[in-house]
Amino acid sequence: MTPGLPATCPLPLSQYPHVLMAHGGGGRLMNQLIEKVFAESFRNPALDQRHDGARLEAGAGRLAFSTDSYVVRPLFFPGGDIGTLAVNGTVNDLAMCGARPKWLSAGFIIEEGLPMETLWRVAQSMKQAAAAADVQIVTGDTKVVDRGKGDGLYLNTAGVGVIEHEQVIAPGSVQPGDVVLLSGDVGRHGMAIMSVREGLEFESTIESDCAPVAATVMKLFEAGLKVHCLRDLTRGGLSAALNEIAEVARVKIAIAEDAVPVQESVRGACEILGFDPLYVANEGRFVAIVPEADAPRALDILKQAHPEAGVIGWVGAAERGLVTLQSRIGATRILDLLSGEQLPRIC
């Protein structure tokens, strides 16, 4: 055995003999995969922050660095496509680190036979999304895989952003007494994808919320507000984001169900398909956890971008990470991670 390597995989292989059938992440099994395989293999101070990206020291300044891969099907959906998704997803991850996004890379995994018109449309979408987010795509890579091996097109984007303040934006900064703010309605991206796949038609089309959030986040810092943590609601939706924060910070996060805005069309689609909107992925929504004193001004800034933004909960002391939900009828239950995956490949 190579010195320094564990004798066996830390996951119970008798229970998980193969790689998890997980397309989007956000459930308990995916968290175990990340913690027991990747975090255990690559452990270092930057990775141990357990954030949407890494905060790195670079001479006299600080940078944020993040990467993500996109395998969404279909490639085009109401409100966006795989190109806008790839740009906005990485831009938003950098913003969640408290950084101003600056530069992106783009890696294209192209299936043999993909129409050139499709590739051109995606490239133009990325160009427009990058301009809207005020970032540049400065490097990239292209690979072609055999026909039938790639679902048309996969994308990877990595990004670098500049941190212009001294605050430490991370789950570990969350404290009892903090307030949880939500930037807008939830569930639209996942339901936009699933509605197209299932051929569901509603009175109004469900459109993805895919959008850059960095401009709104930067206004929080420009206003001089203290921000303890930011997390976008992609993998596993609102529930996964709060559970990941609570686990790292070792706090209790309590939210109220009637404070979480959900469009009626999204709620209806969730009911038809058997999904819970609190677990459905978003691509333009985030939570901000701030001290109580700064919550009113922070909320004003969030509402300038989305009137649906609001206070959805608070942080309390606890011996271990815990998230609870007060239902519309007043009952309280634990809002846990799913044991498996709720949605297949929606990002």
Image (cartoon, helix red, strand yellow):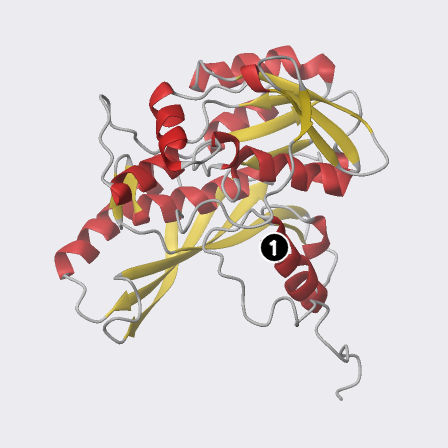
341 vs 115, left or right, is right
Can residue 315 be seen?
yes
Across the whole image, how many numbered discs are drawn on residues?
1
Check disc 1 and give the amino acid type: Leu
Extreme-bottom residue of the structure: 1
Q: Position of residue 302 (x, y in %)?
A: 51, 19
Rendered image quadrant of residue 141: bottom left
Identify the residue shown where x is 23% and y is 73%.
147
Rendered image quadrant of residue 294: top right
Q: Position of residue 272 (x, y in %)?
A: 36, 32
Q: Position of residue 124 (x, y in %)?
A: 22, 47
> 210 or 187, which is in the foreground?
187
Identify the residue shown where x is 36% and y is 25%.
268
Residue 47 versus residue 176 in the image, above or below:
below
Mark 1, residue position: 29
Q: Crowding near pointer 1: few (<14 within 10 Å), some, many (20+)?
A: some
Identify the residue shown where x is 25% and y is 52%.
123
